[in-house]
Amino acid sequence: MTQDGRGLLERLADGPILGDGGYLLELERRGWVQAGPFTPEVSITHPEALVELHREFAAAGSEILQALTFYASEEKLATVGLAGRVDDINRAAVAIANQVADEVADGGRERPLVAGGLSPTWVYENGDAAAAQRVADLFDQQLDVQVAGGVDLVICETFTSLGEATIAVERAKQTGRPVVATLGFHRGLHTDEGISAADAAAGLLDAGADVIGVNCLRDPSGSLLVLSEMKAAVPDARLACQPVGYHTTLAEPNFSARPEFPFALESIALTRGEMAAYALAAKEMGVGLIGSCCGSVAIHVRAMAVALGKLEDTERRWRAEHGRPMSAVERHRA
């Protein structure tokens, strides 16, 4: 459960903090999640798989563990016959994240913050008051369970519409927890409604978000490009960046629109070195919450943690003194 200690804003005041990586796509790669709907019922069907992934991210240096509540709303879960399990899935996801956070604290490290989460409902329609109310109700259902389970903050993520993101922020603020709000941008620098990234940044702050930024869809360079527009508009805002761990291009900045999605993504994966370079670039830009999203696995997070000075580089540099090669490293790179 949530422990007394430094919260999100206190930690950000001391410097950048490191988020975790991607859950649903990695769990799909491991065989626990179905590609297509990418719904998070693994928290109740195979909780041990989710525990293991949280542990990997924690061991890699993550200072925030995000409960797997992405797409854990009623309308989305109904598409796979799980509308009646909304509370169970949200409750289990938060409990698992807290379990691993407690394990980290028991090991002597500062306890990672546990984040609840809200994500697109696929119900929102711009200008439709009834749809907006339905979205608010769906978010409240999730938040009631997440708060009861003990979350330290709420991350409202991957919204491509400012309108839906605003509803998420406003509902999350009612919990009294710090709120992070991040937008995804399909193409160009505008939301689905045609609002510029700059104006969207101001809109998120006006709605009450404590931290704003971008996540998912784009690779690090594409994400930082959007974030630079947001920062220029609101230079004093706390910023978050959580790009995907895949290469995207200016021609197709959205990884989920590439032909490799979802079954050939390994062919466009970023290296650990590229993710480490991103972390340093984000720090240089003044990003406070430096994280990652789909396709980012533990080795990416560890490389980021080392680059940011949060973990010691324990990679051994060695060459045996026995006169003959004893590994491919020695044979080919002597």
Image (spheres, rainbow, N blue to C red):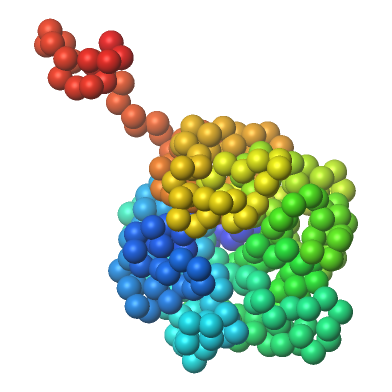
Q: Is residue 4 visible?
A: no
Front residue of 95/266: it is: 266
Q: Residue at x 75, y 73 (%)?
A: 164
Residue 95 x/y as whole percent: 42, 75
Residue 188 x/y as whole percent: 79, 50
Residue 169 location, quadrant: bottom right
Front residue of 184/29: it is: 29
| Image quarter hosting the N terminus | bottom left
Q: Is residue 320 visible?
A: yes
In-image side of 189 versus 186 (left or right): right
- Total residue callouts: 0
In-image side of 185 versus 304 (left or right): right
Q: Residue at x 47, y 87 (%)?
A: 81
Q: Residue at x 16, y 14 (%)?
A: 325
Position of 53 relative to 316 (above/below): below
In-image side of 227 versus 42 (left or right): right
Position of 295 relative to 139 (above/below): above
